[in-house]
Amino acid sequence: MLKQILAASVFTLASSVIAQAGCGLSGGDVRILGNEFPAIQAVSQGAMECADDNVTVSANLTKEHRDLQVAAMTANPAEYSVAVVANSSIVPLMNDGLIRPLNELVEKYGDKLKKNQLITIDGKIMAVAFMANAQHLFYRSDILEQAGLEVPTSYEEVIAAAKTIKDKGLMEYPLAGTFKSGWNLGEEFVNMYTGTGADMFKPGSAEVAINNENGIKALNMLKELTSYMNPDFLTYDSNAASAEWEAGNVALMNMWGSRAGPISDDEGSTPEIVAATAFTAAPTLGGGSTPATTLWWDGFTIAANISDEDAEASFRAMMNGVDPSILTDETKGHAVWLIDGFEPGPTAQGVFATANAGAKPYPMLPFGGLLHSAAGAELADFLQGKESAEQALTDIEAAYTTAAKEAGFIK
Amino acid sequence: MRHSTFFWFVLPSALAMFLFIALPIVSVFTQSLHVAHDQVVEEVETCAVFSCTTELRVNAEATAELYEEAPLGKFAGLDNYANRSHLAFDEVSVVWAQASGPGEFFNGIYNLPFYKALTFTLAYTFIVTPLVIIFGFMIAVAVNSLSALVKGPIIFVSLLPMMVTPLIGSLILFWMIDARGILGSTLQYLMGDPSLSLKASSTLTWIMLMVYGVWHSAPFAFVVFYAGLQTVPKDTLESAMIDGASRWQRIRYVVLPYLMPLTLFIALIQLMDNFRVFEPIVGFNAEAHATSLSWAIYNYMNADSKLLNSAATTSMLTIIGVAILLTPVLVRTWRDFNRR
């Protein structure tokens, strides 16, 4: 409980450790900024090993990293030499030109990297990915068995399964999800809308294209899901939903792959619940062929506003952090690693199944975050039954367009 | 005091106020009149872990050049104030034209982000402020009549809510009012409704935030009133007793008038404090049900949307709001001052 309260707290949980060792660097100053979860902790631990008398390595791993990174890296010299980012958080850094192309460094020191780890934009390598992530289906095999149900593959089946579980009195609120108003809810919308197969923007422009029958389909499904959720669903982020799962209150939920490991460990839950927890691909929507979710990656970038010496030291330290040797029995379960030599264990099955089913990556569009925010803020009224799906879509469109005009994407 | 003495006396604080209050406000106002430059976007091939696609990208170099020329962005006049995120003149007139009654008009207005935030902010300010004053006064009078032995510990305990950091205090309460928390399940038991959830209903969330606000701020009013009570002239109280005034009459006709300036002071501070309510909304994860102007500013500055000009505009509107709120109190203080 204490762990969850700490994790849920919006406070900056910063950690800064200096390790002793060295990995052959001649000098430089490495300062890492990143999100805080076990996989990134493992990578930054690996980078820390490069610290010696000439090289300093420090890390600030915090949930608030996205709010810090742009300002911290706009400074010259930048406050951090390395930013650990995901599909969405790399966008503001690229918009402002705050990260440097890594082609030369990759050529010199990147022999252990696989081609798909290199995030390449217009021929320039802007980031090195080390793990993949996606929201996918977590299910309780024991509950499904008791209810006589197959593992759902579509959201329609999820709803039917939830109804059966509820009707049979097995659970009162069989579903959960990260529906907290704001970023989490926006992500649910993006996932569900992606499941319709339609694009969120008119091709080649920043004009939004969600106010249509696909949008209504996505919204109605989101609302139907919430009718089988704890009524507090608009306050549930990953931590709260995971806690509900570990408490045994939930039978089905679409949840981040990076949570599969922590949920399967021996903390916070009973052995029975852990043993019955299984993972599969995210469900499809309305007979669609690809899962209604988006694929994510986490990777590292190197700041533009630092000396070449620091950039080289940072790159080599991070290469040490994503070296295949960091894959131990403990860290293997932390993530779906893209690192060479990783063999997916049971907790990685869900992300792999989702990727194999053809799920689309979360778009790295410069204006994507604006739509994400608009959806996250405007959907709460609809899910509470205060307005219609049409009105909610019109609100999202209007909020996005206002924001995109201010940000200079729409004239 | 001679004019030159007065000048040198206030110079340091006037200078500090100019540097740390006036200049930042001017800067925020300037930013609120601008929007970002038109982004230079281009289609480029993007290869990520899973596949390659052609997507739009911002050309960072070309954009940087635009900002080199005009660092503030594009001048937009009062557009930011008029757009949907703020005063929403166009949307309000549409709602006005279409609404069939005041209820529908209000719903239409409430659907706009700025007015939604303003509604809660005003409701919070005007409900919490008087309650804080009333409760603070009641606690002060009660504590004042206790024996000296227990006074110290009671005062300490009464001050606790104010000592707890607002964010932490609201987070603790957030877990306690959870359907499985101690307060949440007690309420369910008392109401006989096992599905009652304080977090799921907008009305209950509003009440919860306001109860939290009173809980957090009442100690402030209490401390001020308690200090004030120590200075109430004993002779006046005693003569009132000799005249046969009851305890209630003494409070009503002696203590209250005597403490009026203090009440004004508390009202002033609390109006300002409550108008910028922020932490409980974050702590209670309440943004689905209640947003405030300060919360809106914070939200505009988050990483995904980072609309600094909108944040500046909302800040200016907040400052104007505070000014309007404080005017009656300030006018009254000014009159009192002149009368003397």
Image (tube, rainbow, N blue to C red):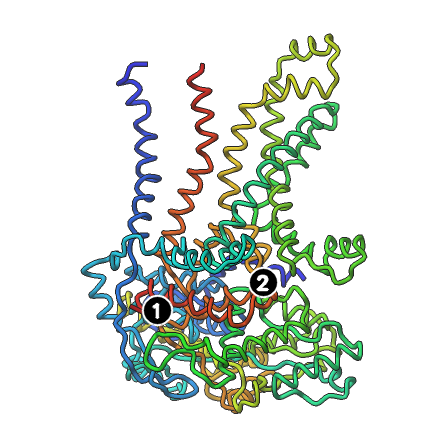
| Nearer to me, B263 or A119 | B263
Residue sitting at the far left: B69
- Percent x, y of residue A258: 55, 76
Identity of the residue drawn at 56% across and 81% down: A332
Mark number, residue B207:
none
Of the numbered discs 2 and 1, the one sitting upstream in the chain is: 2
Identity of the residue drawn at 46% across and 75% down: A211
In which quadrant will I find the C terminus of chain B? top left
Which amino acid, by three-letter code, is at mark 2? Ala
Which amino acid, by three-letter code, is at mark 1? Leu
Q: Is residue B53 above or below residue B63?
A: below
| Residue A132 visible, this angle | no
Position of B329 with respect to A347 (left or right) is left
- Percent x, y of residue A364: 39, 77
Instruction: Look at the numbered disc 1 and give the secondary structure of its residue.
Output: helix
Instruction: Look at the numbered disc 2 and give the secondary structure of its residue.
Output: helix
Position of A33 with respect to A310 (left or right) is right
In which quadrant will I find the N terminus of chain B? top left
- Percent x, y of residue B237: 67, 13
Residue sitting at the far front: B100
Q: Quadrant of residue A322?
A: bottom left
Label 2 close to label 1 by CB (< 8 Å): no
- Percent x, y of residue A95: 32, 70
| Nearer to me, A299 or B266 | B266
Chain under disc 2: A
Mark number, residue A93:
1
Task: Report the residue marked by disc 2.
Answer: A7
Chain under disc 1: A
Report the mark closest to the observer, 2 or 1: 1
How far apart are the two marked residues, 2 and 1, measured between alpha carbons? 26 Å
